[in-house]
Image: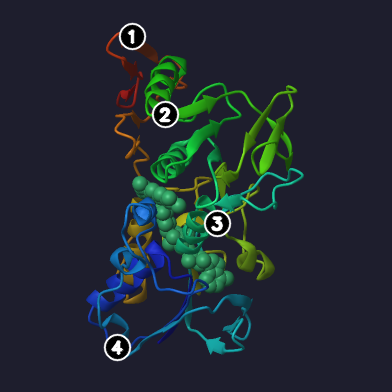
Amino acid sequence: MEIVVIGHGMVGHKFLEALADSGNDALHVTVLCEEPRAAYARVHLTEFFSGKSADDLSLVQEGFFERSGYALKLDARAVSIDRDAHTVTASTGDVLSYDKLVLATGSYPFVPPIEGKDRDGCFVYRTIEDLEAMQAFAKGSKTSTVVDGGLLGLEAAKALRDLGLETHVVEFAPRLMAVQVDDGDGRVLRGKIEELGVTVHTGKNTLNIGDGEGAQNRMNFVDDTHLDTDMIVFSASIHPRDDIARVARLEIGARGGIVIDDACCTSDADIYTIGKCALWKGQFFGLVAPGYDMARIVAKQIIGQEAAFAGADMSTKLKLMGVDVASIGDAHGKTPGSRSYQYSDERKQVYKKLVACPIAASSCSTA
Ligand SMILES: Cc1cc2nc3c(=O)[nH]c(=O)nc-3n(C[C@H](O)[C@H](O)[C@H](O)COP(=O)(O)OP(=O)(O)OC[C@H]3O[C@@H](n4cnc5c(N)ncnc54)[C@H](O)[C@@H]3O)c2cc1C
């Protein structure tokens, strides 16, 4: 059986490992990887700034692609899928035939369409190449700003602070990590982040970016204030990479994402989708663990075993900056009839909230 995989990120590689573990040697697998290097631990990307090399972050065991039946093509972007002919055309000119196609194209960072977003010093935070470019630019910089006060934004802020830059976080919402925490949590979190030397600006809507005074760039906000900064890192939100699936006329969600069923199958029975680009029952999964579940499920299907995706726990925990923030379940108490109980100690900077829901299990958030 010929299998083509588009995307060699964390989930794409987990799929290959699961397939290889099955011991089925009648499979021929070709992987198209748009990046110049094989899969690496994107979740540990920030460790690149603290001295880890691209090799340290690699997920590919030595010799993995030497085994027969598995081929990896680097710097090779899939540009189109011909569903009738069962072929994929790559940017390298290769045309690959498939019996089963697996889309593992992940996501891309959304940069708001503001004037000046492409100026020198503006970056996104997704690949090793992004970090290399930031590291080089930081050498001639004093100040940096991250656009996003969410999990990823705070992680990027910590990395910039560690590069020795004066660091700001600009957040549109009235508090940090607005998805996961409420106002009480947000206040405590802000205090803790500012103690680490990162200046937080909430409720800021960027109008445009122009020349700065004493810094490379100036962010002008809608409320007539501004911030001068050398570097700007956009980390505001991620969007599923569904471009190739759209062109191939697979079913796409209203707000993007490749629609899959419980078997991780798309609207074409010979095409599966796994990881961050997948939309299951109207839900995206930004964390890696649900993507790994999907990868194992599709590997099973391909070797003829039954398996179904059943959703995932989306609990989140801030993993850097020495600040403990955890959010589990319905932390905002949106479930009808839910009641919330709070504990707050401003002196010790502790905030805990328990949401008791009438039917499902309780939820909580703490900082
Ligand atoms: C800094 C950072 C920290 C994170 N921390 C955490 C964390 O702590 N916990 C957690 O659960 N998650 C975390 N995440 C999210 C996690 O990295 C993702 O959930 C995971 O990478 C998703 O894997 P994926 O394979 O679906 O997508 P990706 O890792 O994005 O891989 C998709 C790959 O497909 C390639 N591709 C796209 N289109 C094509 C094409 N047409 N042809 C060829 N290749 C293509 C892309 O270039 C990419 O290499 C973090 C992400 C970042 C950026």
Ranked by sequence position, the earlier of labels 1 and 4 is: 4
Q: Which circle marks residue 346 in the picture?
A: 1
In front of the other: label 1 or label 4?
Answer: 1
CA neighbours of label 1 inside 10 A, class few (<14), some (14 to 19), many (20+): few
Q: Nearer the viewer, residue 46 or 274?
A: 46
The Cα atoms of the two marked residues, 1 and 4, are separated by 57 Å
Q: In the figure, residue 222 lies in which quadrant?
A: top right
Q: Amino acid at mark 2?
A: Gly
Ranked by sequence position, the earlier of labels 2 and 1 is: 2
Mark yes or no: residue 274 visible. Answer: no
Under circle 2, the secondary element is loop
Q: Position of residue 348 (x, y in %)?
A: 27, 12
Q: Which circle marks residue 259 in the picture?
A: 3
In front of the other: label 4 or label 3?
Answer: 4
Q: Amino acid at mark 1?
A: Glu
User: Would residue 285 be found to the left or right of residue 26 on screen?
Assistant: right
